[in-house]
Image: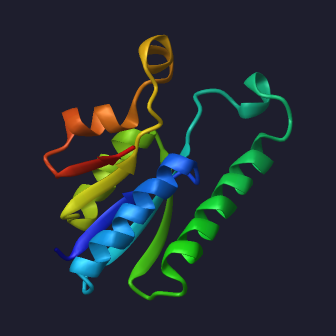
Amino acid sequence: MQIILWATDGSESAYAAGKMVQHLKTGFPEAKVIALYVREVMAYPPQALVPSGFEDLDQNEQRNVERQIHDLFGNSHDVELVVVEGHASTTIAQEAERYGADVIVVGSHGYHGFDRLVLGSVSRHLLDHTVRPVLVVR
């Protein structure tokens, strides 16, 4: 295994996925980790739909991602933070192809029923729309 793509949004479920990546690194110490943070692109300007402070929220999420990386991997040169804009599941799949990821590791928020229908499921979409192996961590 040479490339592990860890999709993270700074959440608790993403941290759990990061712990799994940390575990995988013990078995594959030469593997490079791509920590991918996708900034969601909105069809309308954020200020039209969301109160002010939206950009601060995004910056806080990115800081959480950076803290997770440091907490799990220290200053390892085998971990690269990549920040891109797009629709999360589609962008994760595209980036996995671009980097030639051997595995995509993603957390599951555990949504069920109506929440899953409304909010969608990044992990479910990845399982259905990529040929790369996907490890979903709960």
Q: Whole-percent x and y of residue 55?
A: 76, 47
Q: Whole-percent x and y of residue 136?
A: 31, 46
Does residue 101 appear in this view? yes
Q: In the image as oriented, which residue stretches furthest toward the top?
A: 114
Q: Whole-percent x and y of residue 41?
A: 56, 39
Does residue 7 appear in this view? no
Q: Is residue 102 above or below residue 14?
A: below
* Residue appearing at x 13%, y 46% in the figure: 131
Closest to the observer, 104 or 54: 104
Q: Quadrant of residue 48?
A: top right
Q: Locate residue 76 relative to residue 28 in the image: left or right.
A: right
* Residue appearing at x 20%, y 65% in the figure: 100
Q: Locate residue 66 relative to residue 22 in the image: left or right.
A: right
Closest to the observer, 41 or 129: 129
* Residue appearing at x 58%, y 76% in the figure: 70
Q: Whole-percent x and y of residue 33?
A: 36, 73
Image quarter in which the C terminus is found: top left
